[in-house]
Image (cartoon, helix red, strand yellow):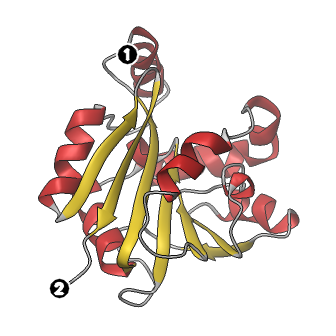
Amino acid sequence: MHGPGDIRFFDRFAPLYDLVMPAADAEPLDFALDRASRPVERVVDIGGGSGRATLALDVPERVVFDLSEEMLARARSRGLDCVRGDARSLPFADDSVDAVTVVDAFHHMPDQQTVVEEVYRVLAPGGVFAVREFNPETIRGRGLAFAERAIGFGSSFVSPNELAGRLDGAEFEAAVLDTGFEYTVVGKKRESH
């Protein structure tokens, strides 16, 4: 799921995407999913594009969710289940997903708070929202933000603490798991008492 201007780029770039992007690192994602207090059997990878990060997830049901049809075609060619749509209006039932991941894509999403609220809605109690993102507080992160603006992306990067604060504000139990050029923040949906 990307901003409208970003979508055209990803549609055009889809055939080359996996050639220039490194494979996703499964370890931080596994660590984040381990924070769930329920079995993680169904994961939706928002902004999952070609399925690069989805493939790193070792769960029974993995769904790639993205707005770019060309990127989803790449994911389908890898045998992954795909759903096309906008993360501001997720086509999943309330409390129906065990985990939601966003890897290297949250900064492309307009109305990030609406996305956070939608993820909260579809997550089952005890489920987790794991975000792997680039840190604009690092030198490399500032360079990436500048480069994306220069090529016309509508990117909006947030720091690990800012993202954790947004998740807390949306009723998640949030934690920053690691920091650096890339960071991981996880929010667990509280279980009702």
Residue 1 visible in the picture: no
For label 2, the residue is: 193
Left or right of residue 125, residue 53 in this image: right
Depth check: give the residue in front, 141 or 172: 172
- Residue, x 39% and y 41% (percent of image)? 107
Residue 2 percent location from the top left of the image: 47, 53
Three-letter code for the amino acid on which mark 1 is drawn? Arg
The residue indicated by pointer 1 is: 142
- The image shows residue 41 at horizontal and vertical percentages of 61, 77
Q: Is residue 134 above or below residue 48?
A: above
Mark 2 vs mark 1: in front: 2
Callout 2: few (<14), some (14-19), or many (20+) C-alpha neighbours within 10 Å? few
Q: Residues within 10 Å of mark 1 (few under 14, many from 20)?
A: some
Q: What is the residue that sits farthest to the left in this orientation?
A: 169
Q: CA distance from mark 2 to mark 1?
A: 42 Å
Residue lying at 38% horizontally and 80% vertically, measured from the top left? 122
- Lower position in the chain sequence, tag 2 or tag 1: 1
Q: For numbered disc 2, what is the local secondary structure?
A: loop
